[in-house]
Image (tube, rainbow, N blue to C red):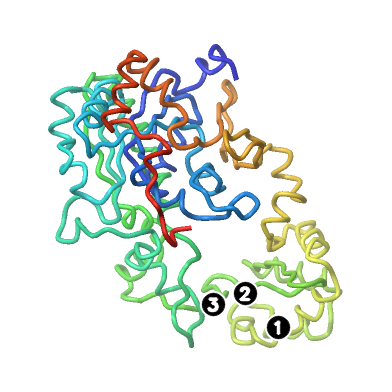
Amino acid sequence: MTQRERSKNPLAGIKVASFCWMAAGPLTVRYLGMWGATVVRVESHTRPDMVRLQGPYRNGVPGIDNNAWFPAVNSSACSTSINIQTAKGKEIAWRLIRWADVVASSFAPGQMEKWGMDYDAVRQVNPSAIYYQSSQLGATGPNRTRAGSGYEAAAMAGFTYITGWPDRAPVPYTGAFTDFISPRFGAAAILAALAYRRRTGKGQKIDESQAESASYLLAPAIMDRFANGRVFERQGNASDHASPHAFFPCRGEDSWCAIAILSDAQWRDLCAVLGQPEWSRREEFAGFAGRKRAEEEIYGHISAWTRERTADEVESLLIARSIPAAVVAKTSYLMEQDAQLKRRGFFRTLRHAALGEHINRGPAFRFSRSQDCQFAGPALGEHNRYVLGELLGMSDEEIAAAIREGGVTTAADLPEIKGAF
């Protein structure tokens, strides 16, 4: 995309200084970069982001610029390698803060304060800055300094307890669940603050709790406890509002289709698709309560039918009658066979400085009057000359001096990282 085309994007001209790490913060500002903002990710060779130290790796070879995870989380951001622990690095960081419209961080509360970069200090030099802070539990309260990942935050937010089977222990979500939920709230909050600043000229501080953001997805369970005193318990694949409601085995290895019957009319349509077998005509199955009592038996009958067909066949037959059903998709299916995602161009090929061409996911929404400007996530320090020279106005001599003084790091500053890969 050319600079002229980029200038047509909704967030063209917005400048973001990202003091974020791991997943939640970078994913938040990723939205801004994808739609035209200039996002500068501050990191250092002396202490690489933990996400750079996780696979999968290209050809199975570990390396900070050779993994797929970091580019996926940080697409549409530039990387500058500044060591804020040094006086020169801190000086450059402050130049970046003065340049920025949005200053974002996702360290545990207290880290930015240790560097002297709390909101009060930032607004002294940049009064109109929007200061966004994301952390596991927020910057206030008795547990504000607790650090951790979205894996623990999912437990704190109430998700882990309700996930699994009623007669077994809770089953934690795969991955850092709240890290992928909270960015949606964070990006919306930043956009609201930008709109407010456009009207008033005033910046403000945004303090996001990742656990609280994720808890919004449990609104029905929370309201049920408030209104009726009921505690939502683990119930496997079952639902209080649908029956049958489960994943059914299909022909092929580890092949499944999800089916949800939300009304008696849908049940009748399902029976018609099944060929009106004798068992389906039992009077007690006509209503939700009767089907709920006999779920195990009904699941056995439906499974016998689905096992004779592929998941795609089951899905096609059911959605033709407006019955909610979907193939349980593997990642290979999503990337290679899903016609809907292909038509919308959700997966796209980007060129990474070290990885070369690789697949990344695009935005889940489209604008009618502008085009996203996603580019590959950066190698560590890849954009030093652009950020330090073009954006901050440093001369080549100043940049060279900053490298000598340790304020700007290079690959030579990488520590020996044992076991991290």
Q: Position of residue 125 (x, y in %)?
A: 16, 22
Q: Is residue 28 left or right of residue 321?
A: left
Q: Dot 1 corresponds to which residue?
A: 298
Can residue 62 be seen here? The reply is: yes
Residue 365 x/y as whole percent: 57, 36
388 versus 68 height, above or below = above
Above or below for 92 versus 118: above
Marked residue nearer the N-terminal end (3 or 1): 3
Label 3 amino acid? Gly
Mark 3, residue position = 236
Toward the viewer: 24 or 399?
399
SS class, disc 1:
helix
Amino acid at the residue labelled 1 = Ile
- Quadrant location of residue 381? top left
Is 241 in front, or is 131? Answer: 131
What whole-number distance in Å separates the C-alpha atoms at marks 2 and 3? Answer: 13 Å
Q: Quadrant of the N terminus?
A: top right
Q: Is residue 417 above or below residue 187?
A: below
Q: Are marks 2 and 1 in contact (CB under 8 Å)?
A: yes
Quadrant in which residue 193 is drawn = top left
Q: Which residue is mark 2?
A: 243
| Residue 354 rendering spot, x and y as whole percentages | 58, 37
Mark 2, other Cα within 10 Å: few <14 / some 14–19 / many ≥20: many
Label 2, secondary structure: give it. Answer: loop
Q: CA distance from mark 2 to mark 1?
A: 9 Å
In the rendered view, tell whether residue 242 sits above or below residue 50. Answer: below
Q: Could you tell me which residue is drawn at 42 percent across and 21 percent down? A: 385
Disc number lying in front (3 or 1): 3
Residue under the point 40% across and 15% down:
390
